[in-house]
Each structure stands twice: as structure tokens, then as C-alpha cells.
Amino acid sequence: MKGATALKKETVSLPDLRSRILSANFYSFSPRQLVKTRFPYVHVFVYITAGKGIVTIGDQTWKAETGDLFYLAPGVPHSYTADPVDPMVHASVYVDLLSPSTPKWKGDQQLNTFTPSAFDESICASLVTFSEGLSIPARISAPRNTPWMKPFFAVIEAFPEQAVGNDLLLRAYFESFFVRYLQYSQKESSTFSDPRIGKLTNWLGKAETSQVDCSEWAERLGMSVSYLYELFHKQTGTSPQQYLIKCKLDKAKAYLRETNLPVTEIAEKLGFSSLHYFARQFSRVVQEPATQYRQRFRGKL
């Protein structure tokens, strides 16, 4: 093997993507299980659905936790080590992004090789560079309830089906995930350059409370409260409390658009202390009352 730099490379625009799913599955590790270094023939996306462990990609090593999403480029060596107490569970999707850049077929059981000398560059999928300047990150944190993760899991659920047109459906699911994933990762990398702030914003996006304890988070992140506020504002343009409110209101907007839940129930579901407080915050941030916002998205039959 000459290394990933010797593989085929193509520069394309994102709309020219031609994905083809080759494999998609869940895999449960045993405690302390080691998967030795191997080399993929296609692009691989690995999401940690549960547990934790160690993931090494090329010369980078991460302590993997639930919610981490990893990208493995064709030809790049990688390995896994499961935690001894809480071993990882992986959700994996193997894909040729510019099909047919590899002759590998759907269901191929040899999409990785453990032996560098046995790696055949001629049958490896092309590496991809996007003309828009987009890059695929090696790792990001993505809560499972993130809307664009749903089509990722839809790929895995639909993969075993043999119905006519299933490959087209898999492509639609994957590309729906992939485009939103790129948008999210570009925004995250440009906004949250400090990983400590990234941890806090990730928690705020999933929090089930409408309050944030900055003293607790400052201690957890190893900084003073004043520096936490300064760094957070520098990278987000707002305070942790206001960022949390915005996350809550983004969820509220989704409930208002997509469900018939009463406004009172939405406010309670999102942890607001009262309907009055929710209504005041919604009108302040969205610039219109919640009921009016819902009406704007409801068409007439």
C-alpha cells in the first residue's frame, strides 16, 4: 500500500454527489475488545450510539463517547478499543460518494483489509474534494435526536430491504443526512473553535432545563466564571443562558410547525417555568407571538 495520498482524487461540486451505499449496520463491542488497524476501501461514517472507548484514525486518537460521529476516508488506517465497563455500540454506513469509483458491490464483506500489503488501490473508492471548499471532519459531536441524524439511521434500517428502488431510497436518505451534516460541521468548526465551549453548547442543545449553572460549568471546564462568559460570548455572540433559551425556542418552533400540541404543553415540555415566561421569551426572540408563528405555517385545505 502506498498510502491514502496515492489514491484516486476527484474535485466535484456538492450537487454532483453520486452516493451508493455498500453496507450499513450496528455493531456491539465486547468489553476491552480491540479491532486492530485496518484500511477501508470506501468512505465510512461511524456513530457511537452507546458506550465509550478509543478510536484512532490515522495519527489522531480520540476518547470516543456516545454521540460522537467519525469519518474514515478510503485508505486511512483506523482502529478501535472498547471500554472495559461500558463498551461501544457503533452505527456504521459504508458508501462510495462518487459511484462507480469502486467496483465493490452492495453487501461486500471485504470493505476493509487488515494487511497494508494486501490493500488494492485500484479498487478503492475515490477521495473527494468539494469545489465549495467544504471539508468532511474526522469527528464531531452530534446528539442522536439531531434532525439530520434521522436519515442516517434510516439508511441502516432500510439497508436489508430488497424492494424495487431500495438503492435509490438509500441514496436519498444518505444524501439528506450528508448535506446537513456538512452544513452543521462547517458552522460548528467556524463558531466553536474552543472544544470546551463546544462541550457546553452541545449540552445546552440537549438540556431539559431552562436554566444553566455557569459556576458548575466553569469548574467542569477548568476556568473562572468570568472567563467562561468572556469566551462563550466571543464565540457565540451571546451568554450561555440566552444561548440555552434560543435552543429551547428553536425546538418550540418545530413543535409549533409540526405538531398540534397546545402552547401550554410545549412550554412545559421544554422546561419553562411558566406559560407567561415562555410567551415573553418567544415574542422577544422570534418577534411574534407563538400562536401567530404557528398560523403562518398552517396552510388551508
Image (tube, rainbow, N blue to C red):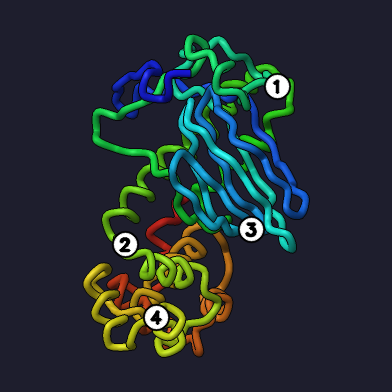
Check the image and name the residue furthest to the right.
Answer: 30
Instruction: Identify which residue is drawn at 44% across, 68% down.
Output: 199
User: Mark 3 or mark 4: which comes first in sequence?
Assistant: 3
**Foreground tag (2 vs 1):** 1
Instruction: Identify which residue is drawn at 54% across, 74% down.
Output: 266
Q: Is residue 291 visible?
A: no
Please tell me whether mark 4 sits on a helix, a strand or a loop: loop
Q: 259 above or below 35?
A: below
Task: Return the residue at label 1.
Answer: 109
For residue 222, the mark is 4
Task: Return the residue at label 2.
Answer: 192
Task: Return the residue at label 3.
Answer: 52
**Foreground tag (3 vs 2):** 3
x then y, percent, for residue 218: 39, 84
| Distance between mark 1 and mark 3 Cα atoms | 25 Å
| Distance between mark 3 and mark 4 Cα atoms | 23 Å
Q: 45 above or below 296?
A: above
User: Mark 2 or mark 4: which comes first in sequence?
Assistant: 2
- Residue 13 falls in image quadrant: top left
Q: Is residue 183 visible?
A: yes
Check the image and name the residue furthest to the front.
Answer: 117
